[in-house]
Image (cartoon, helix red, strand yellow):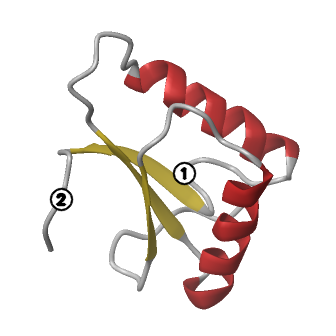
């Protein structure tokens, strides 16, 4: 089983929505091809219904169905609402 290696090159997806669709899976697959592992950064929202744990579960469930493992090919982290880089 692959273990996510924090020292290795990693692709990043900045995710802003509470949902995770087939377009997101396609974006994940594309990012994974580049480095072999992906960090999915879920942007904190100043909204009453924002629930990081629920979003994490939604993403993890979708990627699990595709054969990917959290802590293996990807990790999910909460990040501030980044607006300027």
Which residue does the image show at 18% across and 59% down from the upper left?
Answer: 83
Q: Does residue 66 sit above or below 32 in this rendering?
A: above
Q: Quarter of the image holding residue 37?
A: bottom right
Residue appearing at x 84%, y 53% in the figure = 67
User: Farthest residue toward the left?
Assistant: 84
Q: Residue furthest top?
A: 48
Q: Residue at x 75, y 54 (%)?
A: 68
Q: Residue at x 60, y 77 (%)?
A: 31
Label 1 element class: loop
Rendering coords of residue 26 (x, y %): 75, 66
> The C terminus is located in which quarter?
bottom left
Residue in front for this viewpoint, 40 or 16: 16
Residue 84 rendering spot, x and y as whole percentages = 13, 67
> Which mark, by number, is residue 54?
none
Disc 2 marks which residue? Answer: 83
Mark 1 neighbour density, 10 Å: few (under 14) some (14–19) many (20 or more):
some
Quadrant for the N terminus, please.
Answer: bottom right
| Circle 2: element type | loop
Q: Are marks 2 and 1 in contact (CB under 8 Å)?
A: no
Q: Residues within 10 Å of mark 2 (few under 14, many from 20)?
A: few
Image height of 29 relative to 16, above or below:
below
Residue that mark 1 sits on: 71
Q: With 32 as the anchor, is 7 left or right in this view?
A: left
């Amino acid at each position: 089983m692959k273990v996510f290696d924090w020292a290795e090159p990693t692709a990043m997806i900045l995710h802003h929505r509470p949902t995770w669709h087939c377009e997101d899976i396609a974006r994940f697959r594309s990012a994974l091809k580049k480095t072999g592992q992906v960090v999915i950064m879920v942007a904190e929202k100043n909204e009453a219904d924002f629930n990081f744990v629920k979003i994490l579960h939604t993403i993890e469930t979708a990627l699990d169905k595709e054969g990917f493992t959290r802590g293996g090919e990807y990790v999910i982290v909460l990040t501030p609402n980044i607006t300027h880089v």
